[in-house]
Image (cartoon, grey):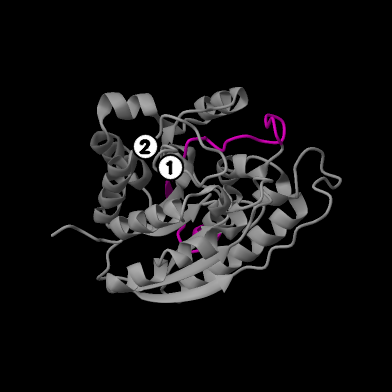
Amino acid sequence: MDPQKNKNVSIIGVPMDLGADRRGVDMGPSALRCACLQEKLEGLGFVVHDQGDLRIERPKNPFGSEGNLKYLNEIIRANAELCGKVESEMKQGRFPLVIGGDHSIAIGTIKGVLKQVERLGVIWFDAHADANTAETSPSGNIHGMSLAVSLGFGHPDLVSIGGEHAAIRPGNVAIIGVRTIDPGEKKFLKEQGVHVFTMKDIDSMGMKRVVEQAIGIASDGTDGIHLSLDMDGMDPSEAPGVGTPVLGGLSYRESHLAMEMIGESRLLVSAELVEVNPILDHCNRTAKTAVSLVGSLFGESIL
């Protein structure tokens, strides 16, 4: 992001836990605000417009008439509302920073950005690929389907949010930090040509080279880059307050280097920060780490 072009940031909270079907991540927006997210951005010279939180209802029955997709109707409704909110903020010349909440909210964020940015590249930090569909998902949790939906695959009512043709191109997507992928996802990612940088790639290539390549992939012929930052991409020793931790993740410095490089590219047009679960955290450590990563993304430096 280029601060000289846009000093206005809109924070949009989405206290959603339905996509993960595990309580606690709905408190993520509050935890991030308590960790001084707004103060961090204002200290870097940004004008912050906190739009508060979207209203999320929790149905008693997770399953409707749509097979194994949990809380489908409410997730559709919430993401459609988020899509409209992101579009509205961008129309006002504001950078949308969406804070969650589970990773199902990426559907609404990306669909909203696509209303304003016709060709969008995506860098997706995550321990998981989130590329399941109803046919491949072992759990029915929609937070594990958000990337597939954003690519145009999945339940038609999810895919059609923001318009049937609102989808990102697989060749402009780079996933970083993956270390667990379901069998159906492996097949899907290979068929679609999504670029996946596993922890093995980071170990062998180094984070600098991985992020350079990811920026090149996401910016190739696009009008900007969206960052989707799932805190479980980091190692649980660094970010314990997440719902689905996986050992062997990104270190604190690797994560900061990545944010610094993406910010310095001046190609970022939107971002979301998801899966902070304060119930599983220690003294709000994960939210504080997340806010420090936002600082690096928005230009904070040592000198």
- Give the residue pinned by disc 1: 125
Label 1 near label 2: C-beta < 8 Å? yes
Name the spot of residue 88 as percent of width and height, x first.
53, 72
Name the spot of residue 203 as percent of width and height, x first.
30, 26
Q: Residues within 10 Å of mark 2 (few under 14, many from 20)?
A: many
Does the magenta portion include 123? yes
Name the spot of residue 156 as percent of width and height, x first.
72, 46
Nearest to the eye among marks 2 and 1: give it: 2
Image position of 85 with respect to 214: above or below: below
Q: Furthest residue to the front? A: 283
Front-most of residues 253 and 47: 253
Name the spot of residue 241 as percent of width and height, x first.
50, 47
Residue 283 visible: yes
- Give the residue pinned by disc 2: 250
Q: Amino acid at mark 2?
A: Leu
Q: Main secondary structure of the magenta part?
A: loop
C-alpha distance separating marks 2 and 1:
10 Å
Which residue does the image show at 55% across and 51% down from the upper left?
Answer: 277
The numbered disc on residue 234 is none
Does the magenta portion include 113? yes
Q: Which image quarter holds the C terminus?
A: bottom left
Q: Amino acid at mark 1?
A: Phe
Q: Quadrant of residue 139?
A: top right
Q: From which residue to which does the magenta span run?
A: 112-139
Q: Residues within 10 Å of mark 1 (few under 14, many from 20)?
A: many
Which residue does the image show at 69% across and 46% down from the upper left?
Answer: 21
- Counting residues from the N terminus, which is met first, the one under dot 2 or under dot 1? 1
